[in-house]
Image (cartoon, rainbow, N blue to C red):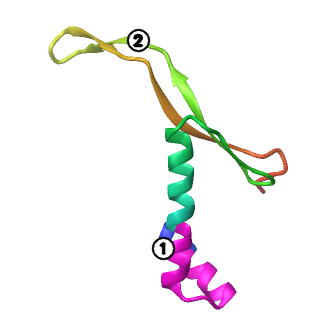
Amino acid sequence: MTKQEIVSIAASQTGVEKATVSAVVESFMEQIRNSLTSGENVYLRGFGTFHLKHRAEKKARNISKNTTIVIPAHDVPAFKPSKSWTLK
């Protein structure tokens, strides 16, 4: 499912214009992005948690040049669904 499909479904179910729904979805995603950038987790009860996972520094191989490179430590965004989710 794409963001545009989500906007279309929400607009048809609520009767709100697609442009307004799209602005709300964009704002929602921007707030999650800003929170994760500042190091805060985002908890959505009944849905899940957006959080950062820390990846330690590691060595990797460039097999085409036969060299070793160091990948620095970094944080990556992650999502953990709530326990109430059940996929059928």
Marks 1 and 2 sit apart, C-alpha to C-alpha, by 38 Å
Residue linked to disc 1: 4
Q: Position of residue 2 (x, y in %)?
A: 49, 66
- In this picture, residue 47 sits left or right of residue 57: right
Label 1 vs 2, first from the N-terminus: 1
Numbered circle sitting on residue 58:
2
For mark 2, give the secondary structure: strand
Q: Residue at the location (49% across, 40% down)?
A: 37
- Crowd rating for badge 2 (residues with CA inside 10 Å; few <14, some 14–19, many 20+): few
Magenta part of the protein: which range? 7-25
Specify the quadrant that holds the C terminus.
Answer: bottom right
Q: Residue at x 23, y 15 (%)?
A: 63
Q: Secondary structure at mark 1?
A: helix
Number of marks in the rendered image: 2
Q: Is residue 63 left or right of residue 45?
A: left
Q: Is residue 26 above or below residue 17?
A: above
Q: Quadrant of residue 65?
A: top left
- Does residue 23 appear in this view? yes
